[in-house]
Amino acid sequence: MADALGKDLKLELEGRGIRNILSAKEATYIPQWASKFDSMGFRGQLKVHNPDLVIITLGGNELAMPDPRERAEPVRELAKAVGARPCVWIAAPLWPGAQNTGLFEVIRANCAPCVFVDTNALIKLEVLAADGVHPTLAERKRWAHFMVRWLEHNRDPVGPQPWSILASISAPPDE
């Protein structure tokens, strides 16, 4: 889902003059990104780019796992790698028939200092691509636009970092 959101999110941010880097790979899992061996290059990219904000969208491939608590430590490790940077972990949108056995709750409980944003509680992505899982191109654009509005609404303009997130987050007002 990182790529489904990422491409249009990148365009939305660039349209506002915000330089950003997208790193997405298909069919990956949280432990791969959290690996201390940096098999996905996450730590290396943080070091090279030193971003003001990190946005993570992982977990869609692991929603139906029988014991999502297995992901608690990899989520903590990934969040630890982010360091003191502001970070937002965006939940994948649920598709019809998706089984969330509690993974989002595990992520929410373990992703600090990242702020967990539950896509499903904030925006309904109604139309799915032919694969029955990913949002259509139009819905991806709508999701990205919504997430940029969420970032703008929850950005702390007087925070210690350029993309500090407010202590009390909320949904942006309707357009």
Image (tube, rainbow, N blue to C red):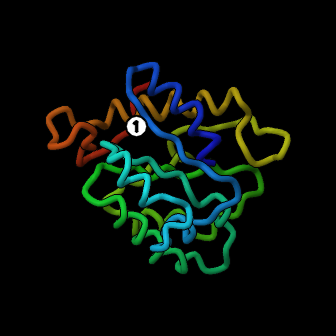
Q: Is 83 positioned to the left or the right of 160 in the image?
A: right
Q: Is 77 positioned to the left or the right of 120 in the image?
A: left
Question: Does 93 appear above or below 105?
Answer: above
Viewer-nearest residue: 21 or 85: 21
Question: Does 29 appear above or below 3?
Answer: below
Which residue is at a point 59% across and 49% down the rendered structure image?
A: 24
Residue 75 image offset from top left, x and y in percent: 46, 69
Residue 52 image offset from top left, x and y in percent: 30, 42
Q: Residue furthest right?
A: 130
Which residue is at a point 45% across and 73% down the rendered structure image?
A: 36
Which residue is at a point 40% across and 71% down the rendered structure image?
A: 76
Viewer-nearest residue: 160 or 128: 160
User: Count of labels shown?
Assistant: 1
Q: Secondary structure at mark 1?
A: loop
Residue 89 image offset from top left, x and y in percent: 45, 53
Choose top left, top right, bottom left or bottom right for residue 129: top right
Q: Is 157 positioned to the left or the right of 127 in the image?
A: left
Question: Does 3 appear above or below 60?
Answer: above
Viewer-nearest residue: 119 or 3: 3
Rate crowding at label 1 as few (under 14), some (14 to 19) or many (20 or more) other CA atoms within 10 Å: some
- Mark 1: which amino acid? Ala
**In the rendered image, which residue does mark 1 sit on?**
171
Q: Is 90 positioned to the left or the right of 126 in the image?
A: left
Residue 3 image offset from top left, x and y in percent: 62, 43
Which residue is at a point 37% across and 49% down the rendered structure image?
A: 48
Choose top left, top right, bottom left or bottom right for residue 39: bottom right
